[in-house]
Image: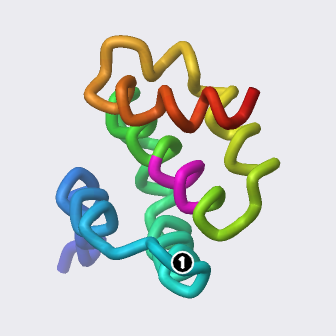
Amino acid sequence: PGVPETPTVNLPRELEAVASMPDSTAALAQAQIHRLEALDDDARNAPEATYTQYRFMRAKALMNLGDDKAGCDSLHSIQGRLAGTRFEQAAKPLMTYCK
């Protein structure tokens, strides 16, 4: 009689699923935010690269939602972590917009 295990989330797979969601309208961006919020605890305990991916995706979704201040603040907080990642190029136009 052991303690039931909590199912583990495959965070990289979940993030890729969120990344494939359309985000061209505020409603679609809100759906992305909702999915990302559900992954917040797992993301905080994930390896640095995965957490950086989560933070980048959340910042981009916030900006697509129209909350530029929150999105830009989030991007600025991870700017150094983005260097050398696959998100560095995608973040450049957003960082330019946020200046």
Determine whether, in the image, residue 65 is placed left or right of residue 99.
left
Determine whether, in the image, residue 12 is placed left or right of residue 25.
left
Q: Looking at the rendering, in which quadrant would you find the C terminus?
A: top right
Judge whether 67 appears above or below 49 on screen.
Answer: below
- Please name the predominant secondary structure of the magenta segment in the image: helix
Say which amino acid is labelled 1: His
Across and down, in percent, residue 55 comes to: 52, 43
Q: Nearer the viewer, residue 35 or 69?
A: 69
Q: Nearer the viewer, residue 18 or 94?
A: 94
Q: Looking at the rendering, in which quadrant would you find the N terminus?
A: bottom left
Judge whether 98 appears above or below 42 on screen.
Answer: above
Determine whether, in the image, residue 69 is placed left or right of residue 94.
right
Across and down, in percent, residue 80 comes to: 54, 13
From where the camera sits, is residue 44 visible? no
Across and down, in percent, residue 17 comes to: 23, 68
Q: Nearer the viewer, residue 30 or 90?
A: 90
At horizontal 34% and vertical 38% (from top left) the residue drawn is: 50
From where the camera sits, is residue 14 visible? yes
Of all residues shown, which one is farthest toward the bottom? 27
At horizontal 64% and vertical 60% (from top left) the residue drawn is: 62
At horizontal 35% and vertical 75% (from top left) the residue drawn is: 22
Q: Quadrant of residue 87?
A: top left
Part of the protein shown in magenta: 57-61
- Is 42 a magenta residue? no
Tell me how many marks there are: 1
Q: Is disc 1 placed on a helix, strand or loop?
A: helix
Q: What kind of colouring is applied to the model shown?
A: rainbow
Across and down, in percent, residue 79 comes to: 57, 21
Q: Quadrant of residue 39?
A: bottom left
Q: Tell me the residue that label 1 is attached to.
A: 34
